[in-house]
């Protein structure tokens, strides 16, 4: 993983991610959305769902990840939600109803129809205060995102660092020894042999250490027995050796 520096602490990681995404395809936006840490990525998510090119599948993913069932009950109870999650949900809902999302190429295979209808039916008066459109209940037909190899976080050090800065763990940093090892069978085998060699050496040190300590403890009483035998001989025969 990258080292954390003072510059990293002061960097606006959300804006940096937005700047990186700005010239990328909406397929990339969708892939990034699914891996963001929501605790620190509100601005990034808000930027994505506010773009005319945002795919419907991406907007639906954000909408349902923002927990509309929870907010549904709050609104029905007379509360006014003000969380970042609700703001994302509300933005998607307003844009969806206004026909803002024109792109509908990607798939969102989940269906929330049954669960949402059951939640509405449990409310007083069985009225949906959000008025969620039928097509937003899913699923949405389409294709998988087409992400070039070089724009995947596991291969792109810039994107990896952006995710890392926003709190998403991404495994080994691209280009690091562990990353190279995982992708090269020869390096992987070499590393495995090195780890095995270290393990064997550690085992031998522990074995030798144990027997070395055991020999020391055995040597002391052994020496005392031998000395005692000589002393006893001297006492009996007057001969020490």
Image: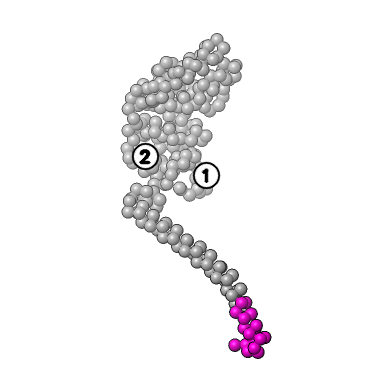
Q: How far apart are marks 2 and 1 (CA)?
A: 24 Å
Residue closest to the far bottom: 238
Look at mark 1 in the image and give the residue it sits on. 9
Residue 171 pos. (x, y %): 43, 44
Please check the rendered image and state whether residue 229 is part of the magenta-colored stretch, yes or no: yes
Q: Nearer the viewer, residue 51 or 64?
A: 64
Number of marks in picture: 2
Residue at horizontal 40 percent and vertical 17 percent from the top:
135
Q: Which of 105 and 72 is in front in this view?
A: 72
Q: Where is residue 198 in the image (x, y as percent from the top left)?
A: 44, 60
- Name which of mark 2 and mark 1 comes first in the sequence: 1
Residue 101 locus on image (x, y percent) = 39, 22
Q: Is residue 20 above or below residue 97?
A: below
Q: Mark 2 points at which residue?
A: 152
What residue is rendered at 46% in x and 24% in y?
A: 63
Question: Looking at this view, is 141 or 241 the one in front?
Answer: 241
Magenta-drawn segment: 224-241
Is residue 78 magenta-colored? no
Residue in the image at 61% along x and 73% along y: 221
């Amino acid at each position: 993983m990258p080292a954390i520096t003072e510059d990293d602490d002061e960097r606006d990681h959300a804006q940096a991610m937005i700047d990186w995404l700005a010239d990328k395809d909406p397929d990339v936006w969708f892939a990034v959305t699914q891996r963001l840490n929501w605790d620190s990525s509100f601005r990034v998510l808000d930027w994505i769902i506010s773009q005319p090119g945002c795919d419907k599948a991406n907007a639906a993913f954000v909408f349902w990840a923002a927990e509309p069932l929870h907010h549904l009950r709050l609104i029905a109870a007379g509360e006014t939600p003000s969380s970042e999650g609700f703001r994302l949900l509300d933005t998607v809902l307003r844009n969806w109803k206004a026909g803002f999302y024109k792109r509908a190429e990607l798939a969102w295979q989940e269906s929330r129809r049954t669960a949402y209808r059951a939640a509405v039916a449990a409310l007083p008066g069985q009225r949906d205060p959000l008025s969620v459109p039928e097509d937003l209940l899913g699923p949405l037909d389409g294709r998988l995102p087409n992400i070039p190899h070089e724009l995947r976080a596991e291969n792109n050090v810039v994107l990896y660092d952006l995710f890392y800065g926003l709190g998403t763990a991404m495994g080994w940093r691209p280009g690091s020894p562990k990353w190279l090892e995982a992708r090269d069978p020869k390096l992987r085998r070499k590393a495995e042999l090195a780890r095995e060699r270290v393990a064997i050496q550690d085992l031998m040190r522990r074995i030798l250490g144990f027997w070395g300590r055991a020999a020391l403890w055995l040597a002391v009483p052994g020496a005392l027995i031998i000395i005692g035998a000589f002393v006893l001989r001297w006492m009996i025969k007057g001969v020490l050796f």
